[in-house]
Amino acid sequence: MTTTRVRGLDAARGLALVGMVVAHLDTRIDFDPGVLASWRHVGDGRAAVLFVVVAGFSLALATGGTTPHTGRRLADDRLAVFVRAAVLAGVGALLTALGTPVAVILGSYAVFFIVALPFLRSGPLVPLAVGTLLAVSGPLLVAAADRHLPELRLDAVGTLFVGFPYPALQWSGFLLVGLGLGRIRLRTFDLGTLTVTGLAAGVILHLLAVDVREQLLLDVPRSDGLVATALMAEHRSRNMIEGASALAIAVGVLALLVLITPHARNLLYPLEAAGRMALTLYVAHIVGYWAAIQADPALEQGSGPLAAWTLVIALAGASAWFTRFGRGPLEWALHRVVVATTGSGAR
């Protein structure tokens, strides 16, 4: 698959990676706007949503951009996506086996790509519509599955679709929204509109979710239904309004970075570099975390200095790496696997 690089996309991926590293390695603090120390955790969960939306946008670019591939090229694209998904699932299984407190996303990430395969030939409307529907209604679908099909959680594949924190019934929607956005020829005005609308809607929806949750908790007799139970949850994979908020913020942040990065005079280069080797850095920070826990088990509870030093090393290392190399090490290895298994279709 060929990929057209969009300035700002790598920066968004890099920013998402930064948020995920903080969420994984830092001392566990729930975000509270009134607590200054918790602001470094504002990206908890939301960073992963941004990561998946960016993946969908990148997938659109790799499969034709605003003009989706057809025929043999589409078949090659689908095979390449399937191979990448299989490799990511394997790497995710290995990282999970390390036993760190991190909820490794790569296995679920692979499923999101498989779900996207039927949409690769679509224009923007279908993936945007289906993606938004899944992203918003996914928590309710998962809750219904829990209530009526509890056996799904006993099955490895079923768990990927309904298990937390990344149920594919919802999170595939985030990737599809990114795919739909990548099919649109976005102008400066469009990016500005998406930025303002996405960020404003995300904040308003979060405040609405908090208010609804508080009202329902005060009215216990009316709070035992499927919808009410979902709305009382705080996590975006359990609460429809929080899911919509996370999606809106991800779209707003992505649009903002695509809008400003070309004009930032390389001030965002460390984020861009980290985004270009996100797989390598994601794997490295989990392996490094595992090694740190072996040396000091107390670090399993998280450490601010550990998270900070990990980010410094990651951003500086990525910036230095691309002065000599064109791909991150794991990105290069994954590319070679795809080329070897798909032949001339992966260019």
Image (tube, rainbow, N blue to C red):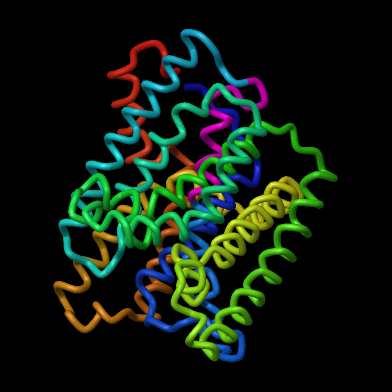
| Residue at the outermost right position | 189
Classify residue 180 as left or right of residue 59. right
Q: Quadrant of the C terminus?
A: top left
Residue 285 seen:
no
Which residue is rendered at x = 19% and y = 49% of the image? 155
Classify residue 256 as left or right of residue 27. right
| Residue at the outermost front position | 221
Which residue is rendered at x = 60% and y = 74% of the image? 209
Give above or below for 301 relative to 61: below
The magenta stretch spans residue 60: yes
Magenta highlight range: 52-67
Q: Position of residue 205 (x, y in %)?
A: 66, 69
Q: Position of residue 329 (x, y in %)?
A: 34, 40
The magenta stretch spans residue 55: yes
Q: Quadrant of residue 226?
A: bottom left
Camera-side residue of 287 and 127: 127
Q: Position of residue 204 (x, y in %)?
A: 71, 71
Q: Position of residue 200 (x, y in %)?
A: 74, 66
Give above or below for 138 relative to 344: below
Dominant secondary structure, magenta: helix
Q: Quadrant of residue 238?
A: bottom left
Which residue is rendered at x = 56% and y = 46% of the image? 10
Total of numbered circles in the picture? 0
Which residue is rendered at x = 55% and y = 83% of the image? 216
Residue 64 seen:
yes
Classify residue 184 as left or right of residue 29. right
Give above or below for 239 relative to 34: above
Give above or below for 44 relative to 131: below
Classify residue 332 as left or right of residue 64. left
Camera-side residue of 266 and 54: 54
